[in-house]
Amino acid sequence: MLDLGQLQHLVVLTGAGISAESGVPTFRGHGGLWRHYRPQELATPGAFGRDPKLVWEWYDWRRGLIGECQPNPAHHTLADMEARLPGFTLITQNVDGLHHLAGNRRVLELHGNIWRMRCTREGTQQVDRTVPLPQLPPRCANCGALLRPDVVWFGETLPADVLEAALAAAAACDIMLVVGTSAVVQPAASLPLVAKQNGALLVEVNPQPTPLSDYVDLSLRQPAAQALPEWWASWQEQRDSRADRDPDG
Ligand code: BJW
C-alpha cells in the first residue's frame, strides 16, 4: 500500500486519454485520430510545407471540436491538487488547453497549444480562439507570412525550457501519476522512467496496458474521470488521519 500521506513532490503527466471523457479524440487506439489520418500528412513540418491549407483545415476542424469540450472531473481534480499541494507539477502532452480551463495555472505543455499560432517568419506567437478561422491558411498581420499552429510535430524538438523543467520535476518527485497516455511518443514517454530511476513511485491511470505498465508500482485500470477523484480523496483521507494521530507532526 502506498503511503500517500508521506508524499511531498507529486508530478502528474497527462496524455490524450484524460480529455477523452470530455469528448476530445485520442490519437491511437479505438476511435483515435491516427486511425483515420496519417501523421506524416498532417503533423510534420514536411506536411505543412507541402500543403499548409490541408494541415490548417485539419487543425481548424479539431479546434472547432475542442472548443465545444469542457474539462471533466479528472481535470478538476488536478486543478484542486495544484491549489492545495505546494510540491505539485503538472506536465501535459495535450494541446487542448483543458487543464487551463479547469483552473491549473502552471502547466508544462510539452507539445504546445492548439489555440496558439506562430509566425513562420518572425516566430511571434499569438493566442487566437476564433473558430472557424476566417482564412485558411491564416497569415501574420504584421509581415504576411504563414502562421502555423504552435504545436510540436513529429521530428521537431520540444520547447527547451519546458522540457528542461519537466525533466527536473521528474527527477525530483516522490511520486508520478501517468494519466491517459499510450507512452510511446518520445521524449515524453521517458519522463516516468527518469522519475523511477530517481526513486519515485509510479502510478498509471489507464484502462489499457501500455509499454510503461511493467515498470509501474500501481496500475489503476479505470477511466481517469473516475480514478483521479477517488485517488485524490484517498490521499486526503490518509493525510487527515495522519494529522489526527500526530497533531504536532
Ligand atoms: C484513457 C482514457 C480515459 C483512453 N482515461 N486513459 C523511434 C524511436 C523513438 C523515437 C522516435 C522514433 N522515431 C521517431 C521518434 C521521435 C518521435 C517519436 O516518439 N515517435 C514515436 C511515435 C515512435 N518523437 C518526436 O518526433 C518528438 N520530437 C523529438 O523527439 O525531437 C527530437 C528529435 C528531433 C528530430 C529527430 C529525432 C529526434 C516530437 C513528438 C511530437 C508529438 N506530437 C503529437 C501531435 C501534437 C500536435 C497535435 O495535437 O496536433 O503529440 S503526436 C500525438 O502523440 C500528440 C500527443 O501529445 C502524443 C502522445 O499521445 P498520447 O497523449 O499518449 O495519446 P494516445 O492517443 O497515444 O494515447 C491515449 C491513451 O489514453 C491510451 O493509452 C488509452 O488507453 C488511454 N485512455 N481513454 C484514461 N478515459
Image (spheres, rainbow, N blue to C red):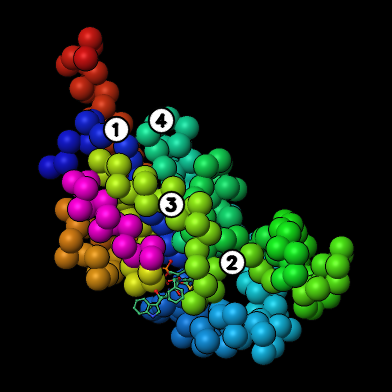
Range shown magenta: 187-204
Q: Residue at x 67, y 60 (%)?
A: 115
Q: Is mark 2 within 8 Å of ligand 1?
A: yes
- The label nearer to you, 3 versus 1, is 3
Q: Earlier in the sequence, mark 3 or mark 4?
A: 4
Residue at the (21%, 14%) spot, across then down: 249
Q: Residues within 10 Å of mark 2 (few under 14, many from 20)?
A: many
Which label number is shown at residue 86? 4
Q: Quadrant of ligand 1?
A: bottom left
Query: Can you identify the residue that label 3 sits on?
Result: 164
Disc 1 marks which residue? 8
The image quarter in which residue 81 lies: top left
Please, what secondary structure does the residue beneath circle 4 have?
Answer: loop
State yes or no: residue 140 in magenta: no
Q: Is residue 84 left or right of residue 233?
A: right
Q: Is residue 147 left or right of residue 229?
A: right
Q: Secondary structure at mark 1?
A: loop
